[in-house]
């Protein structure tokens, strides 16, 4: 029997949504062991005055097994 826990965090990237997710997972994996999945809860694009996307932001829920 195992128990899973979910944590929520925010990550960002100037490149893409996928890059923001990868960055968030990599950073979380530095201290959280046993990550089993991630749910992208929200996506936000930051824009400049001309309407160009300058940054992608994601809200992640990361599931891991409690040791």
Image (cartoon, grey):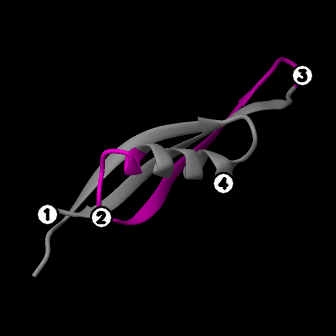
Whole-number angstrom distance, CA of label 1 to CA of label 2:
8 Å
Whether 38 is drawn above or below 42: the answer is below
Q: Mark 2 or 3 closer to N-term?
A: 2
Give the residue displayed 31% in from the left and 45% down from the top. Answer: 31
Front residue of this view, candidates 28 and 4: 28
Direction from residue 3 to residue 23 in the image, left or right: right
Q: Which residue is mark 1?
A: 67
Give the residue displayed 73% in from the left and 34% down from the top. Answer: 14
Q: Residues within 10 Å of mark 1 (few under 14, many from 20)?
A: few
> x, y percentage for residue 1?
10, 82
Image: magenta residue range:
28-50
Q: Is residue 43 magenta?
A: yes
Where, by quadrant of the figure, is residue 51 drawn?
top right
Q: Which residue is mark 4?
A: 18
In the image, farthest residue toward the left: 1
Check contact, mark 1 vs mark 2: CB within 8 A: yes
Q: Indicate the secondary structure of the residue bearing disc 2.
A: loop
Picture quarter with the C terminus: bottom left
Front label number (1 vs 4): 1
Q: Indicate the secondary structure of the residue bearing disc 4.
A: helix
Whether 19 is drawn above or below 11: the answer is below
Whole-number angstrom distance, CA of label 3 to CA of label 4:
24 Å
């Amino acid at each position: 029997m195992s128990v899973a826990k979910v944590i929520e965090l925010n990550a960002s990237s100037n490149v893409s949504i996928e890059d923001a997710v990868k960055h968030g997972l990599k950073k979380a994996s530095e201290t959280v062991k046993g990550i089993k999945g991630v749910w992208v809860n929200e996506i936000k694009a930051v824009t400049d005055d001309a309407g160009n996307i300058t940054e992608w932001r994601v809200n992640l829920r990361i599931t891991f097994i409690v040791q």
